[in-house]
């Protein structure tokens, strides 16, 4: 039987296991990427492993998230990352060089290779035909140490694209349409693989928009074939030698298939506060807009920004609107400047920020109270913008540009014929802001500022624990809910003690105090959640910081993939309710005993909890692989790697 693109890459990287849906497999990791908000931890974790030099083919450390330097903390992190990269064999992309996913696509991604990134939007590389997966920092540390990456073999969902996009409709509308079909949890346990005639009509940056935001479906990753468009993209980046053709065999079988006829799509918009609340733009047309943000790793390629510039040329941004622009990379910004598009954007009234994540992660430009903000980004979770009551809508660059000068939500098709956007035939290639690692690592010392603390080591799982429910939440809880980001909190990403004071603050300001009291009386914490617990980011702080506060168990209906791994990696036990169990009695404050926890984690597929006050017993499911069991027993992945390495010596 033939293979899909994803299966071909998995097969050629398979270290152990069989490619059977749901079975644990291990694959070789060719490349890794990190960004500064997750990278500091990943590298501190790698340091704790005591290995002198990384073992991957190529690893790159980017600085793009924490670029607002309102105190010494972020700048100290940048310095740490640069010195660390130089010493251990990692390329370092300086702040100002661009967003990790955009730069990696331009300068490093290779069809047919595997890439792990400590950021959930790593699947952007799937636009180039890479198998690119977002993971927690500890999984990066483990790959840097030369270990393969373990995952359960996903189902491959084939997405058959036919036709081509009509004018004013773009790649963002394709992924918004898909989100309307399968929701923010429809991709869990799956790889979304695109195929069919429609693929040829999409350029690599457009494909990358689609694979990038595939993360919002919960998918393990998304991937396109590597074809003539891929070759053309690599040639523009002066890397044609990295091209490799890769497409699914004609008799490849997908676990499931769905078809999208590109020619029938229209401009779409995701309404607050979830990327799958999709409506046609025309249904919201006329709604007043206060802010328009263009950029992020989803939509800041040269193609996107040239389209925006073409739409805004000769116009003025509406007086009631603040238009903010953050180009994806230095390459994009330089080319916009050289071909005059930047001047058009500035003349129209755009506020140009540096090439970084910026407002997407709440690093500045928070909207005003109750504002309507249209963004070309990928997430609109409540509060992520920094303004809890603002309404954040996700749209294409075309729809964003239309609103910027009309001052209201506008279906761009109402603007008449779409202006041609000029795309240069030659790209500016200049890697001078990417530092190669030192050839004399012994002479390099890693520089750690006072805000950089070492990684707390987990403890072995004890036979039993006494715990208390510290919080009960609903469905689709995001990692932004658990561990908020934004300009005030992000500077503490390398200081676990400090950042843990912000756990769950937006949902329940009393959570941290409750945890403190529990810890003081020797009681562990339980969080009770709903479906898709921990969706969104890869930030392992959403597991490590709760663990630091004393959380031992999370009970939910289901978990998002990366967060579940992160919980296990830090020794928190992820349990699920059985179908018949409503969980209604598990209120905050309830005491729960787990008398045989260690034994059950070691051998069983369920865990018993007692509510002695009401004489109730709960049987909770534990769905983990054998490897994950031993990680939980040893109190986390760091201990496990160190232990396993010492056993094999
Ligand atoms: C995000 O978009 O939420 C982030 C910030 O890029 C995160 C990583 C992080 O929390 O640092 C992600 O998507 O993984
Ligand atoms: Fe940065 Fe936003 Fe992309 Fe996350 S989603 S990597 S914050 S641009």
Image (spheres, grey):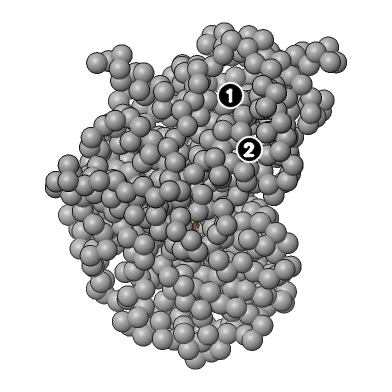
In the drawing, does residue 583 fall left or right of residue 251?
A: right
Q: CA distance from mark 2 to mark 1?
A: 16 Å
Mark 1 residue CB less than 8 A from any atom of ligand 1: no
Q: Which mark is residue 532?
A: 2
| Classed neighbour count for the residue bearing mark 1: other residues with Cα under 10 Å, few (<14), some (14–19), many (≥20) | many
Q: Residue at x 30, y 17 (%)?
A: 646
Local secondary structure at mark 1: strand
Nearer to the camera, 207 or 430:
430
Residue at image position (33%, 36%) is 47
Quarter of the figure with the N terminus: top left
Which of the two discs, 2 and 1, labels the residue nearer the N terminus?
Answer: 2
Q: Is mark 2 within 8 Å of ligand 1?
A: no
Disc 2: CA contacts within 10 A as few (<14), some (14-19) or many (>=20)? many
Residue at the image position 66 percent from the left and 83 percent from the top:
320
* Residue 194, percent from left and from top: 43, 48
Name, please, the residue furthest toward the left. 439
**Where on the picture, by quarter, is residue 322?**
bottom right
Measured along the vertical axis of the image, is residue 341 above or below residue 532? below
Res 97 label: none
**What is the x, y in percent for residue 187?**
55, 41
Is disc 2 placed on a helix, strand or loop?
loop
Whether residue 510 is visible here, answered yes or no, is yes
Q: In which image quadrant can residue 45 be found?
A: top left
* Residue that mark 1 sits on: 573
Q: Nearer the viewer, mark 2 or mark 1?
A: 1
Residue 219 lies, in percent from the top left, at: 51, 41
In the rendered view, tell whether residue 117 sits above or below residue 1. Answer: below
């Amino acid at each position: 039987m033939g293979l899909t693109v994803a299966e071909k890459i998995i097969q050629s990287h398979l270290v152990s296991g069989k490619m059977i849906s749901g079975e644990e497999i291990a694959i070789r990791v060719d490349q890794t990427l990190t960004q500064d908000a997750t990278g500091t931890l990943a590298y501190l974790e790698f340091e704790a492993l005591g290995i002198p030099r990384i073992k991957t083919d190529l690893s790159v450390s980017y600085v793009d998230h924490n670029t607002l330097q309102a105190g010494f903390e972020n700048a100290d992190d940048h310095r740490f990352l640069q010195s660390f990269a130089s010493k251990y064999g990692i390329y370092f992309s300086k702040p100002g060089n661009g967003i990790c996913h955009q730069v990696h696509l331009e300068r490093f991604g290779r069809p047919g290779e595997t890439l792990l990134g400590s950021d959930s939007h790593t699947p952007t590389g799937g636009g180039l035909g890479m198998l690119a997966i977002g993971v927690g920092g500890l999984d990066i540390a483990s790959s840097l140490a030369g270990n393969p990456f373990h995952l359960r073999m996903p189902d491959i969902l084939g997405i058959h694209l036919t036709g081509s996009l009509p004018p004013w409709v773009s790649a963002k509308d394709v992924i918004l349409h898909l989100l309307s079909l399968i929701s923010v949890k429809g991709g869990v346990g799956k790889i979304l693989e695109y195929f069919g005639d429609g693929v040829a009509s999409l350029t690599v940056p457009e494909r990358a928009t689609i694979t990038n935001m595939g993360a919002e479906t919960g998918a393990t990753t998304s991937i396109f074939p590597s074809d003539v468009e891929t070759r053309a993209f690599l040639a523009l980046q002066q890397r044609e030698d990295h091209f490799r053709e890769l497409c699914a065999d004609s008799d490849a079988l997908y676990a499931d298939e769905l078809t999208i006829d590109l020619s029938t799509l229209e401009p779409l918009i995701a309404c607050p506060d979830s990327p799958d609340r999709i409506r046609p733009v025309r249904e919201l047309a006329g709604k007043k807009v206060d802010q328009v943000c263009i950029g992020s790793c989803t939509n800041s390629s040269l193609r996107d920004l040239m389209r925006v510039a073409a739409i805004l040329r000769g116009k003025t941004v509406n007086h009631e609107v603040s238009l903010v622009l953050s180009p994806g990379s230095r390459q994009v910004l330089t080319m916009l400047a050289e071909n005059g598009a930047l001047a058009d954007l500035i003349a129209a009234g755009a506020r140009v920020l540096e090439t970084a994540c910026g407002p997407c992660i709440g690093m500045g430009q928070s909207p005003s109270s109750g504002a309507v903000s249209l963004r070309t980004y990928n997430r609109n979770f409540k509060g992520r913008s920094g303004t809890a009551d603002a309404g954040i809508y996700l749209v294409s660059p075309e729809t964003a540009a239309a609103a910027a000068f009309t001052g209201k939500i506008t279906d761009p098709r109402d603007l008449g014929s779409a202006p041609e956007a000029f795309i240069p035939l030659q790209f500016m290639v200049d890697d001078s802001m990417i530092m190669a690692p030192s050839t004399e690592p012994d002479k390099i010392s890693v520089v750690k500022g006072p805000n950089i603390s070492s990684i707390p080591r987990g403890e072995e799982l004890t036979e039993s624990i006494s715990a208390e429910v510290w919080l009960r939440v609903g469905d689709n809880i995001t990692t932004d809910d658990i561990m908020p980001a934004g300009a005030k909190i992000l500077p503490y990403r390398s200081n676990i003690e400090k950042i843990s004071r912000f756990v769950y603050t937006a949902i329940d300001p009393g959570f941290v105090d409750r945890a403190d009291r529990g810890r003081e009386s020797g009681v562990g914490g339980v969080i009770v959640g709903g479906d898709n617990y921990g969706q969104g980011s890869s930030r392992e702080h959403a597991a490590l910081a709760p663990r630091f506060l004393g959380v031992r168990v999370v009970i939910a209906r289901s978990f998002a993939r990366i967060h579940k791994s992160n919980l296990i990696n830090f020794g928190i036990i992820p349990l699920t309710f059985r179908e018949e169990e409503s969980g209604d009695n598990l209120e905050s404050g309830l005491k729960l005993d787990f008398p045989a926890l260690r034994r059950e984690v070691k051998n069983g597929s369920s865990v018993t909890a007692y509510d002695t006050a009401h004489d109730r017993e709960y049987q909770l499911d534990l769905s983990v692989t054998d490897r994950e069991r031993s990680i939980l027993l040893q109190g986390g992945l760091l201990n496990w790697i160190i232990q396993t390495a010492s056993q094999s010596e």
